Image (cartoon, grey):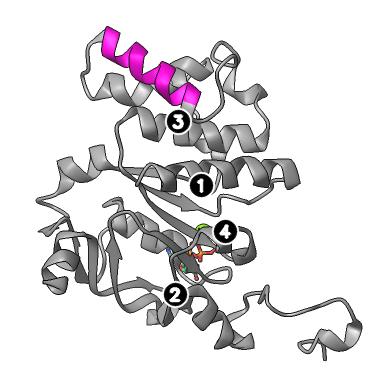
Amino acid sequence: MNSEKNRAGLLFSVRKVSKIFKTGGGGENRALEGVSLDIYQGECLLIAGSNGSGKTLLMKILAGLMAPSAGEVFFLGENLEKAAVKLRSGMGLVFQDADAQIVGETVAEDIAFGPRNLGLPGDEVRRRVETALGITGLTGKQDLSPRRLSGGEKRRLAVAGVMAMGCFAVIMDEPFANLDFPGVVQVLEIIRDLKRRGNTVIILTHELEKALAFADRMVILHRGMIRDTGKPAEVLARLRDEYGIRNPLHSYSAVEDCTWLG
Ligand SMILES: Nc1ncnc2c1ncn2[C@@H]1O[C@H](COP(=O)(O)OP(=O)(O)OP(=O)(O)O)[C@@H](O)[C@H]1O
Ligand SMILES: [Mg+2]
């Protein structure tokens, strides 16, 4: 009964995925290796890893933007090729570089871009833009140039675009990068609201303390391999220094606490 329920709730199933790049001199960089992971609908999954651990590659592979060198990814039970249309409309991406994602001259046009591309009628596009502005707290800014938004607002704009597409799942790559405290709060509010609405939220970050409160589960990615998976408190209790991730449970208020210093 339980396994039936779990299978029904499976959003992504990643099976032994590897990504290998050729390097000069005939060598290779095994950037992802044997990654197997199930992601469930409605969960908030934190994928933590230091710089270069393979987070962005994993996001690109999940989103069908990059083919793995080996292994397979299933979205709602179908391999990514078969699921391409479902994936494009159901899965939204918020990139590490918020500026690179801006496509419209105004906030409203930027949000309208996705639903318009889906071929929706004008009335429906306008309705969706209004709703997305409201959900992301950008109402009143619809006529501004997106470039004038603050860092936190730009990330909210990316989420608004995703919501207007009707996506029920979102992957956020380093959503806290370059944000000051109010910006972080804005993004956290969005994550909280997405969760409340039952959306699946996948957060890729090395700043795990910021999103920890929302995470149902967390995964440690280290040098392209999954090194741990579980409830955040359990994984944090086992966290190793070699992963290069700051453990928010530890105190670093005195020099003696900084055990990694030589
Ligand atoms: N197109 C590419 N060609 C060769 N190597 C690549 C390519 N893209 C990524 N890599 C390598 O794959 C590894 C993982 O990269 P990735 O961008 O996924 O890291 P990340 O965890 O997102 O890091 P960051 O926290 O800095 O964003 C890195 O060692 C990187 O050099
Ligand atoms: Mg990255």
Instruction: Choose the circle earlier in sequence order: 2 or 3.
Output: 2
Q: Are marks 2 and 4 in contact (CB under 8 Å)?
A: no
Q: Which secondary structure type mostly characterizes the magenta part of the structure?
A: helix
Cβ atoms under marks 2 and 3 closer than 8 Å: no
Q: CA distance from mark 1 to mark 4?
A: 10 Å
Which residue lies under the disc numbered 2?
A: 24
Q: Nearer the viewer, residue 252 or 68?
A: 252
Q: Earlier in the sequence, mark 4 or mark 3?
A: 3
Q: Which amino acid is tagged 3?
A: Ala
- Residue 250: percent from the left, percent from the top? 72, 80
SS under mark 1 = helix
- For the C terminus, which image quadrant? bottom right
- Which of the two marks, 1 or 4, is nearer to us in this view? 1
Cα–Cα gap, marks 3 and 1: 14 Å
Q: Residue at x 53, y 69 (%)?
A: 52
* Residue holding disc 4: 211
Q: Label 3: few (<14), some or many (≥20) within 10 Å? A: many
Judging by the rendered image, the residue that carries numbered circle 1 is 192
Decide if ligand 2 comes within 8 Å of the CB at mark 1. no
Q: Magenta residues?
A: 123-134
Q: Earlier in the sequence, mark 3 or mark 1?
A: 3
Q: Amino acid at mark 2?
A: Gly
Tag 4: amino acid = Ala
- In three-dimensional space, the C-alpha distance between marks 4 and 3, rounded to whole angstroms, equals 19 Å
